[in-house]
Image (cartoon, coloured by chain):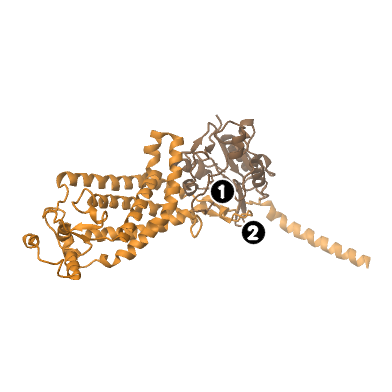
Chain colours: A orange, B brown
């Protein structure tokens, strides 16, 4: 038995020796352990990011390298300030030039002294809810992009950081009432804001902005419909992209957040530019316009000049008492 | 002045995670934050490599460039540090960082992320060197004591190197020359716009 075991061992030994002899020439050809090793540049070229496995619980840290932050940095530090600067300063410049050359759009027939309800209390509440949130959101948002080059050198690091901290909190928390306002605006005024043939005519005549033209309009004219859709669509986009940033990694990775920030900021600066125009036309740009959102009642002559079809609708609905012929109507037409 | 850098020799890293543990312990880093981690690429396949990664203290650091409140600064040693007093927790540095270094104590809490935390190269923060405030906010300041980052000091295979960029690059080059191979200085091209010939 022992001799059998020995012979087996001997046979195995001889076999192993034989294998070694065969293997040696192969082994002598200098094994390169990196021949199949992963290469950084190759991985980056394939996917533009390098990802692996980590043994710590935070699985997101498995992303080793993602150099695309560089492009995002370029956008955030160079492209966005240009887009924002041109859009906002351009809009302000255009308005200033318009105001200085054309001036306030006056009530041509003067005030009639009689008013008609244009926006009820709820509509005005929703408008101002959205508007106040928007102004705070716009200022705190612009601070993130333009604060460091413009405001920080003026007030210093501590004060700027303190202000930016509060601005960030305001930006995050006011996004909720703002989103609610946008949703309510969407539902509340969708009826009057479907584009139709009247708007084509309105647009052809340039909205009556130049000269003393008053293209007819229902409750909302072409320009107001544009503002409505800018608020609804722009609001939806900034809200969605903003929440993606507020809740990191809920459905987005780093690239997703970079994209969300790009979309959020571009739409936001254009939104601000559009709202500057809206604020202008609602205040110093047009006589009698602010009352619509102030007291909620506009002068009948204002309604006739700017929303003739709407006024006719209202008169038809409220009965003959309000619809009595008025000398001014004949004169105007 | 030295230009401090990290270099992970991926052909030596055995994914023991001693660097991760040393860092967490040395700086009493809170739960959920890992200033350093080890990532294994091609796990279980031929050519698998593990790389220990933290803030690379980039040249022309993207985090510093995008910070809305300018809370970052680079020390004379080339270490990228930030002030937690100025940080507003907006998350911009973490969008820009190629290495996933910036982290927040309260991710996903209505955007109130808290102050950003990242590797300090064991060099603390803007507070007085070795002070209690500095330790509470940023952890130990070993550099001020003349010591190198603990992760690299603790590395069992001397895979992770920390120190002046030229010196650690030289050590790595000699290694590559001697053993005949090297998978390169991971992250160097992205962080320092240069790489080590191997």
Can I make out residue B66 in this image?
no
- Residue B144 occupies which quadrant of the picture? top right
Q: Residue furthest top?
A: B1
The C terminus of chain A: image quadrant: bottom left
Residue at figure coordinates x 43%, y 38% from the top left: A160
**SS at mark 1?**
loop
Residue under label 2, please give it. B44
Subunit of label 2: B
Inter-mark Cα distance, 2 to 1: 32 Å
Q: Earlier in the sequence, mark 2 or mark 1?
A: 2
Front-most of residues A229 and A314? A314
Q: Residues within 10 Å of mark 2 (few under 14, many from 20)?
A: few
**SS at mark 2?**
loop
- Residue A123 occupies which quadrant of the picture? bottom left
**Going by the image, does B94 lie left or right of B25?**
left
Residue under label 1, please give it. B105
Q: Are marks 2 and 1 on the same chain?
A: yes
Q: Residues within 10 Å of mark 1 (few under 14, many from 20)?
A: some
The answer to whether A321 is drawn above or below residue B68 in the figure is below
Front-most of residues A263 and A150? A150
Q: Position of residue A322 (x, y in %)?
A: 16, 66
Residue at figure coordinates x 14%, y 58% from the top left: A301
């Amino acid at each position: 038995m022992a001799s059998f075991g020995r012979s087996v061992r001997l046979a195995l030994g001889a076999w192993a020796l034989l294998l070694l002899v065969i293997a040696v020439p192969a082994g002598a050809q200098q094994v390169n352990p990196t021949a199949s090793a992963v290469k950084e540049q190759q991985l980056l070229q394939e996917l533009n990011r390098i990802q692996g496995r980590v043994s710590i619980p935070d699985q997101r840290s498995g992303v080793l390298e993602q150099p695309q932050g560089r492009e995002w940095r370029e956008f955030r530090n160079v492209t966005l300030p240009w887009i924002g600067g041109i859009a906002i300063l351009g809009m302000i410049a255009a308005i200033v030039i318009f105001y200085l050359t054309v001036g306030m759009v006056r009530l041509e027939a003067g005030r009639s002294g009689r008013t008609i309800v244009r926006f009820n209390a709820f509509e005005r509440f929703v408008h101002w809810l959205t508007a106040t949130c928007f102004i705070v959101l716009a200022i705190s948002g612009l601070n993130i992009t333009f604060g460091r080059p413009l405001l920080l050198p003026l007030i210093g690091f501590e004060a700027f950081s303190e202000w930016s901290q509060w601005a960030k909190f305001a930006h995050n928390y006011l996004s909720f009432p703002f989103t609610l306002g946008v949703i309510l605006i969407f539902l509340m005024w969708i009826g009057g804001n479907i584009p139709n043939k009247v708007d084509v005519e309105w647009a052809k005549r340039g909205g009556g902005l130049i000269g003393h033209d008053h293209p007819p309009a229902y409750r909302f004219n072409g320009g107001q419909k544009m503002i409505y859709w800018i608020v609804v669509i722009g609001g939806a986009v900034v809200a969605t992209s903003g929440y993606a940033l507020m809740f990191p990694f809920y459905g987005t990775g780093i690239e997703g957040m970079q994209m969300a920030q790009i979309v959020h900021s571009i739409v936001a600066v254009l939104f601000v530019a559009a709202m500057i125009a809206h604020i202008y036309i609602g205040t110093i740009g047009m006589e009698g316009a602010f009352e619509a959102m102030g007291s909620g009642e506009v002068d009948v002559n204002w309604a006739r000049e700017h929303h003739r079809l709407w006024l006719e609708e209202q008169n038809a609905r409220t009965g003959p008492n309000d619809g009595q012929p008025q000398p001014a109507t004949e004169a105007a037409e | 002045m030295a230009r401090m850098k990290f270099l992970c020799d991926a052909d030596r890293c055995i994914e023991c995670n001693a660097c991760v543990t040393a860092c967490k312990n040395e700086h009493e880093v809170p739960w959920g934050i890992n200033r350093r981690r080890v990532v294994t690429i091609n796990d279980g396949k031929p050519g698998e490599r593990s790389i220990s990664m933290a803030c690379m203290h980039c040249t022309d650091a993207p985090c510093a460039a995008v910070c809305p409140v300018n809370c970052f600064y680079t020390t004379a040693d080339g270490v990228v540090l930030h002030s937690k007093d100025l940080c507003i927790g907006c998350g911009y540095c973490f969008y820009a960082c190629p290495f996933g270094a910036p982290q927040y104590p309260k991710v996903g809490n209505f955007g109130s992320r808290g102050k950003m935390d990242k590797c300090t190269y064991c060099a603390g923060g803007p507070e007085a060197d070795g002070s209690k405030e500095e330790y509470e906010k940023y952890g130990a300041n070993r550099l001020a004591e003349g010591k190198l980052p603990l992760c690299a000091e603790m590395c069992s295979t001397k895979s992770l190197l920390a120190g002046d960029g030229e010196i650690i690059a030289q050590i790595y080059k000699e290694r590559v020359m001697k053993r005949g191979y090297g998978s390169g200085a991971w992250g160097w091209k992205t962080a320092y716009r240069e790489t080590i010939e191997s």
